[in-house]
Image (cartoon, helix red, strand yellow):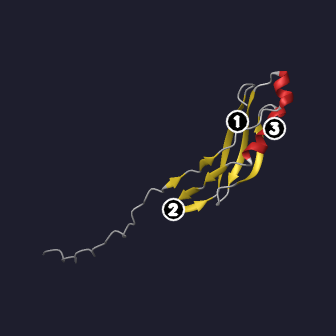
Amino acid sequence: MTPPQTPPPDLVLAPKQTPILQSDVVPARVVRSVPPQYPPFAKQKGATGTVVVQAKVAKNGSLTDLKFLSGPPIFRQAALDAVKLWQYKPATLNGQVFEQEVDIKLEFRPNSR
């Protein structure tokens, strides 16, 4: 006696997979920078230092939400005043503009300004 024939299994197709594309991120880029004014009272003291300011690059390329992150307090206002005037080309993700936070490092040396 031969065993009964089993019908062939249904053909199971793998689900159609959409290829995963790598995102095309282009970070924000400075297009205009203004050097900070070296404060006269800092020059008298011979003070030097590096200031880091954090800002958000808006969709129009201007800077918003400025924050003094680190550095000698004597340079705080000069750094913020300079960075307010900077202009960026905003960041894009797959061609769409988006806001991006950036850290801006400013060097203060007596002979730099």
Say the numbered circle drawn on residue 76.
3
Badge 1 marks a residue whose secondary structure is strand
- The image shows residue 17 at horizontal and vertical percentages of 38, 66
**In this view, 14 is above or below 49:** below
Q: Secondary structure at mark 3?
A: helix
Q: Which residue is mark 1?
A: 106
Residue 67 lies, in percent from the top left, at 77, 45
The residue carrying mark 2 is 95
- How dense is the environment of label 1, judged by Cα within 10 Å: few (below 14), some, or many (20 and up)? some
Going by the numbered disc 3, the residue's amino acid type is Arg
Q: Residue at x 58, y 61 (%)?
A: 97
* Marks 3,2: beta carbons within 8 A: no
Check disc 2 and give the amino acid type. Gly
Q: Which picture quadrant has residue 62?
A: bottom right
Which amino acid, mark 1?
A: Leu
Depth check, front residue: 45 or 54? 45
Give the CA distance from mark 3 to mark 1.
Answer: 10 Å
Helix, strand or loop at disc 2? loop
Few, some or many residues within 10 Å of mark 2 (<14, 14–19, 20+): few
- Examine the rendered structure and indicate whether residue 5 appears above or below residue 107: below
**Which is more N-terminal, label 1 or label 2?**
2
Quarter in which the C terminus is drawn: top right
Q: Earlier in the sequence, mark 3 or mark 1?
A: 3
Residue at 68%, 37% in the rendered image: 105
Q: Position of residue 92 (x, y in %)?
A: 55, 58
* 103, 85: nearer the viewer: 85
